[in-house]
Amino acid sequence: GGVECFADFADGSRVGWQAKYVFDIGSLLTQATKSLETALTIHASLTQFIVCFPFDLTGPTGRRGKSGKEKFDEWRQKYEDQATADGRQLTIEAWPASKLRSLMLEFDTSGGIRSFFFSKTVLTTQWFSQHLDIANDIAGPRYTPELNVETDLWKWFAAFGRTTEWSAALNDRLRSCRSTLERLSSAVRRTESDSMSPQWPDDSRSEAQTLVDATENLVEDCNLLNKMSNASAHKRCVTQLEEILGGLTSIEEQLVEDLEEQHGQGRADSPGFRQFMAEYMVSFPAANLDYVRDLIGTLNDLHDWLSSSACSLAFEYAFVLIGVAGSGKTHGVCDAARYRFSNGLLTCVVFGHTFGGEPDPWTRIVETLGLPITLGMDGLLDALNAAGEMTGSPLMLCIDAL
């Protein structure tokens, strides 16, 4: 809507940034005018419009004509005055090349972000491909790409890297929960019996409805885990799930008791009784009980998955993989790195035997990755972080034989 991004503040004001990749004042003002007019139309609370461009405005000279700065100031004053006449507050600010450089130096003290974006040899797609080729060579016979045995290892890496496979596993379980929850929710609201389904017992209706509402909220909270790597949010979901399962188990016991009071001891789980009622009476007196058990089953599956490494590693920033020699750790790491790369996800693999003594570990990692030594620890981490941000997913650093 006329801006690249915007920020809203507590007082209701909005600041918007617009970037123009042009190198003369005429093109800049022509394009900025169109963007500003669009922004003012769409963003009613816009009070500041910042124009970013990759050149510096020329100052006044002895030559005839207006300088770049004078032209920009004249354009800015025109639209600020016009906004005032329209009854709205607006300030326009220029962020030329010198301003952008100053901000970059201020926030990128290590130089890692600059290295990632502006060095032609640092962390490019080709660099990652070559890096993994080198890692495969170092792994030697411990990694054979042609061999691939399905293990839980990939599930752990999928969770740790918050991949689409991990999200799909979460979404599949939530879909099952919604389906069984919908059936139970309809049953709890039923106040009269029909030929197919019994009414819900009045004495447990309120408790059951509370659990239905809690489960709906839980499913939505779990869905938000797709968008956040907050360990506390994950832990809350597990805790809420355990509380809901406890409540549903209590409801299950009540329904079993009610059913057996009406039809006799042991009837709740009697295949013969159920078959007789379905075939000869066309009645399903255990339907409510089955709805509860179905939901308990899907929630137990969700709980087991949320509590497993195949899920919980999505909320960690480090994990240690252990196993006896020859169990396939190196193969798994290299295979995961290759698979991730083929899906646009980035991984660096270094080997523990290269460490020890001098230089310090971070310098050794920089050397091993073939990056400039001048980066240092902070520069390396900033550069790797920038590379991960560009993909929208975490970059994984693996140290084999730590």
Image: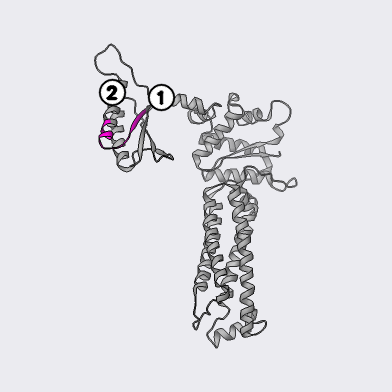
Where does the image place residue 19, in percent across and percent down from the top left?
Answer: 37, 33
Q: Which mark is residue 71?
A: 2
The residues colored magenta run 81-93
Task: Give the class, few, some or many, for how many residues have Cα within 10 Å of label 2's Cα (few <14, many ≥20).
Answer: some
The residue under label 2 is which amino acid type?
Lys
Relative height, residue 218 to residue 181 (above, below): above
- Residue farthest top in this picture: 62
Image coords of residue 94 (percent x, y): 36, 27
What is the secondary structure assignment of the residue under circle 1? Answer: helix
Gap in angstroms between the C-alphas marked 1 and 2: 17 Å
Name the residue rendered at 28%, 31% in the picture.
79
Depth order, front residue of 59/74:
74
Quarter that holds the N terminus: top left
Q: Where 193 sits versus 129, above or below?
A: below
Left or right of residue 166: residue 402: right
Which residue is tagged 1?
97
- Asked whether residue 298 is in view, the answer is yes
